[in-house]
Image (spheres, coloured by chain):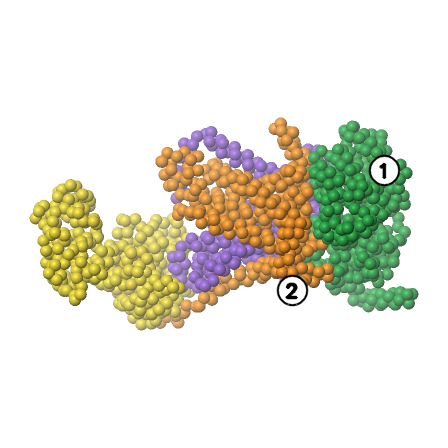
Amino acid sequence: MKHMMKMTTATVALCFASGGVLAQDATLTIESWRAEDQAIWDDVLIPAFEASHPGIQVDFAPTAPTEYNAALNARLDGGTAGDLIVCRPFDGSLALYQRGHLADISDLDGLDNFPDFAKAAWQTDDASASFCVPMASVIHGFIYNADAFAELGIEEPGTVEEFFAVLDTIQQDGTYTPLAIGSADQWEAATMAYTNIGPTYWNGEEGRQALIDGSAKFTDPQYVRPFEVMERWADYMGRAFQAQGYTDSQNLFTLGRAAIYPTGSWEIGGFNDQAFFEMGAFPPPVEAEGDTCYISDHTDIGIGMNTATDNPEAARAFLEWIASAEFAQLYTNALPGFFSLSNAQFEVEDPLAQEMISWREECESTIRVAHQILSRGEPNTWNNMWTVSANVFNDAATPAEAAAALQQGLEAWYEPQQN
Amino acid sequence: MTNIASTGRARAGRARGLSTKAAVHTVLLGYTIIAIFPVILVILNSFKNRRGIFSDPLGLPRGETFSMEGYATVLTQGDFATYFANSIIVTVSALFLILLLGAMAAHALAEYRFRLNTLLGIYLILGIMVPIRLGTVAILELMVDLNLVNTLLALILVYTAQGLPVAVFILTEFMRTLSRDIKDCARVDGLSEYRIFFEVVVPLIRPVLATVAVFSMIPIWNDLWFPLILASGDATKTVTLGVQQFIGQYTVNWSAVLASLSIAILPVLGLYALFSRQLIAGITSGAVKG
Amino acid sequence: MSEATTEQEKTAREAKPPKRRKRRVGGGWHIFVFIAPAVLIYTIFSIYPLVESLRLSLFDGLDDGSAVWNGLGNYVTLLFNPTWATQFWNALWNNLILFFIHMVVQNPIGLLLAALLSLAPRFGSTYRTLIFIPTLLSVVVVGFIWELILSPLWGVSETLLGAVGLAWLYQPWLGLESTALTTVSLISVWQYVGIPMMLIYAALLSIPDELIDAARVDGLNGWWIFWKVKLPLILPTLGIVAILTYIGNFTASFDLIYSIQGALGAPNYSTDVMGTLLFRTFFGQQLQIGDIHMGATIASMMFFIILIGVTIYLVLVQRRLQRYEM
Amino acid sequence: MSDLVLKDVRKAYGEARVIHGIDLDIRDGEFVVFVGPSGCGKSTLLRMIAGLETVTGGDVIIGGEKVNDIVPADRGIAMVFQSYALYPHKDVYGNMAFALRHAGEDKAVIDERVKKAAEILGLEALLKRKPKELSGGQRQRVAIGRAIVRDPEIFLFDEPLSNLDAALRVQMRVEILRLHQRLKTTMIYVTHDQVEAMTLADRIVVLRDGRVEQVGTPLELYHHPCNRFVAGFIGSPKMNFLAIDPIDDGRRVRYRQSAPIDLHVKTRSGAVPTEIGIRPEHVRLVEPGKGAFDGTVFVVERLGGETFLHVDFGHEEPFVVKADGGVQLRSGDVVGLVFPAETLHLFDAEGVAFEQTERHALLG
């Protein structure tokens, strides 16, 4: 084993040596859906990489999230996709690997810097091959307007009932919309509501694995409960929230018109720019005082190598750098709220980001429930979750109906759930 | 002719009475407001800062709300000059090819009897029924083979293929109504079939060409999909794609978003104004008559 | 003119130097030259890719991206597998509703505007130009504008309704299952009404003045002239408008719905149309892997549905619409 | 040198045959008119001579040379079209100069020829105008001028006057005649108007359904139509036709119960006259009871110099008599009709005429 490792290292080193020459004028293009990050890549990350890797140029070429999958697939099929591909977690990227678009990078040294759960998002089911380097996870929770809380004399809620008490107080005061979330774009309902508070009820990983192995069903109470809580949220959401889209919610909150924003940590960067008030964050409230808290610490972004790249050495060099402690430090701080998955020690400077990453210590972590394996067939569980979660908000489905729809969709094709 | 018609109408107009006139103008004015209000709203708000946009969306930009910050962001962040140049090159070239090749094909279909005439006519307008986007993957593979990815030529070719059916359809219909004598006369005068097309037919169909140009221009200028797939590189990006990505990048910065939207609207209006007079002439000459 | 001159002319003509060699009529080459470039570009960049796509519908994809022959299996899946069939019929039904709304709202408005414009009011060309403007805009722009206007947050529509005392009417129309499809349709009507307007306007202008004068002499007033004389004469144009509406309803509607309501046709698939179903199936959607074979199957179905509609129109409707020489 | 010969010329569009083998010989300097009802193939034939339609059988020979495959421009022809076919984007000068410019003719030559043609046609003042600023007559003159400028060996006219009003048509007719006298060039002229044919032609070619019915000088056609069709087509008002019963082996005929009428025709074996034709101008009016039979005048058309009387004597088709301008008859008057035997045309059941034996030979 040790011998093998050495060999691998030697091969990689050799690659580097020869690649170093070849890569003199290599240009790498990165495919990504994170258009918002353009400035950070251009101004911070790429210069840092290029400084340590002379001769390799990197070009960050994002596509808007709504078109990313379609455009990327078309480009991969047509052979024009970039050298490096930012990977969505689990099955989306797994399919790309199976079709031979993403290279097997199991032998990449840098992968050792990551814990297993992080690597799992970009491995085959049997963990035999890795195809993307984990970049970051995002943590779900609630960001609030601290000035408003102070003004109304309320504090971060710890339990569900405290949470609703806080919402009531804000509602009665009338200055602020209690919850900044809408159902128009649907995905927030699934992402920022159901998979945000759900782990608290289904005990995180335990509940997620139970669905995968077929020992639990979506119709079981622990999966229906979050819908019931969401149903109660509707009373505290903005007027006409049915037509309130994602950017509407962002504006509502950052303009100081809403008090609490159910969210993911990826918002921190943007909010820091836009909001003119103090912000705080709290994790999903628990049922009863003293219960274990669960957070969705979702492995969200990885990066892999296009098998069709003309510069595999340069691309591998870049991936090694992504896996390095330097990148972890740079990235986490350039994009507060995107937390590196690296084992390397890195400092989080942003206070809000600090607050959210600290939940990793207090709470149990899990990932979004539908992402691994469960969205492999048709109907797609994650698509379904968007629709039914929005339906619960819109009063178009009862929690029981919503859960039944999820279960019915899953049973239609997922064998472990079929008996 | 025009004079006769308008006096006839003027006479009728007097007889019709004031109340009818008022009703006509009320309806037209009402709908015109509905049509342009949203556009004006966007342009108006693009000159405000973020707070101004939200606190008083319907107000004019005033002292404290007036701001060019949106435009500043757009102009410094995006390479809009390049995007514009790309859009214009693509749109104008594709239009040129659509009009030229479409008119040539329509001329052949309308002027000459030959076997397969009807069949080819049907074949050429079949494309109206199917969105060309369905063939994306094959198009991309084709472009890869031709080494045209990330070139403006790729876009030009696809848009030309996309625009031809409608152009051939409209132009053939119109060319069938052209006098045969004038082409025969040119033949007797010794012009080759090619020169007859360019020197006799093309001048005769100019207004109709303008009509086809306007109808073909809209989907080309506004297309998002093929620039994304075929030419998303920074050097070949079009305005619509640039604006769309800009919106993605500055979701919350509405002054910037509105400014970029305004920037995307203006050139189309300009091109439209350019073709507009000919468009009306073309339409009234029966170019788009069923 | 004296006889002498004429004689001179004739002699001059006869004395003309021998002509250069006479050119012979070419074969049909010029026809080929005229038609070949269009056919070539169109075939390579439109028909071939489309046929290629449709061909895919007869195959089934494997995990590794390769394909196996599946005959009409995909069509059977689409029409009879409950998961697919529900989505398919829902999308088709929504398309038909969309078509219906365009027929009863967009085309009558277009007809009304065209009829009024054809009366040649003052500023007619200004009205016409301005009303056509939305048609020129990209759906990115249109989608964004209307989302803003209808957004509860920005409050523009609410303020406007309030100004006429109707604030209570305000609803988050785009977000309610009951109203979303209608709202999107109306936005599309707003954008595209210029096209029927222009087509009908052109048809109205081509009606000779004598005919209108004759009707006036026969004692018809403006209203009856419109119903009894103009409308029958522009029926063929209305037919064309109808069939263009039908086709556009499948092809053009996608962009707007996708940009406003997303690829899942929110809320709860109430605005899901063939276009969005095709898009997410063909290209995938976040965790949904794109399935080009099922996508191609949907695309082919769409093509057949359009073809059926067009055929019905050609066989049943157009044959009965008489074209009048004018 | 610029004789035009058509040898068994045929035209078919796929299965549909429109010209069935036409033989024709046109001498240099001759003015020939193709006349016939619409759809008879006269325009097609002209266009085949011009080279605008391909010849699907037979030969077109100009000046001794077979031109079936020669492009129109090199056949030495010029053509004037019914719709004038002026290039709307060029002014009068440009229209007239177009063909020469295209042929690369010297500028000075072009100028001279255009000026000359303009002078002949009285267009000097209009050279800078665009076609849409011209009246119909002026446009037609430009169209002719454009043909003149090319100095062709054969002029082809395709119904050039049918878009003009009556007065202009008469005037232009005369101008075309004068032009022919002056240029002495072969002219072939297509019309459906027999008056134009009669007044303009040296020889008339009457066509029907893609076949030549008769070729001859105007008076030959007038006096010796070789069949009922030509007889009815030439002359205005039209010839009157009456079905008759032959008696005495066809030497004499009788209309209904009238007295037998003597005939002066060559009989043909197997052919029996079944119909007589008489031109309105040949019927003589007499007192009632004095003619072959009596009829009642029911319409009187006064043209001033002459009068057309529509007479009813129980005949199915209208029967028209051309009388003097000053004739004192009114609707309702009864008149006697006389058909002078030497003016009668006789036709058999197939419509083929019997040759007259005693018609004055004014008309060779």
Visual hue assigned to chain D: yellow
Visual hue assigned to chain C: orange
Number of marks present in the image shown:
2
Decide: few, some or many residues near mark 2? Use Cα within 10 Å; few <14, some 14-19, many ≥20.
few
Compared across the picture, whether C204 is left or right of A21 comes to left
Say which chain is purple. B
Q: Which residue does the image show at 69% across and 55% down from the upper left?
A: C290
User: In front here: D179 or D213?
Assistant: D213
Residue B222: x and y in percent read 61, 49
Describe the element under mark 1 as helix, strand or loop.
loop
Chain letter of the residue carrying label 1: A
Circle 2 is placed at which residue position?
B145
Query: Dots 2 and 1: beta carbons under 8 Å?
Result: no
Q: Quadrant of residue B8?
A: top left
Say which chain is green. A
Describe the element under mark 2 as helix, strand or loop.
helix
User: In front here: A82 or B1?
Assistant: A82
Residue at the extreme front of the image, as rendered: A419
Residue A346 visible, this orientation: yes
Tell if the residue under mark 2 belongs to the same chain as the one under mark 1.
no
Residue A269: x and y in percent read 80, 44
Q: Quadrant of residue A5?
A: bottom right
Q: Which residue does the image show at 79% across and 56% down from the upper left?
A: A303
Q: CA distance from mark 2 to mark 1?
A: 60 Å
Q: Quadrant of the N terminus of chain D?
A: bottom left
Circle 1 is placed at which residue position?
A287
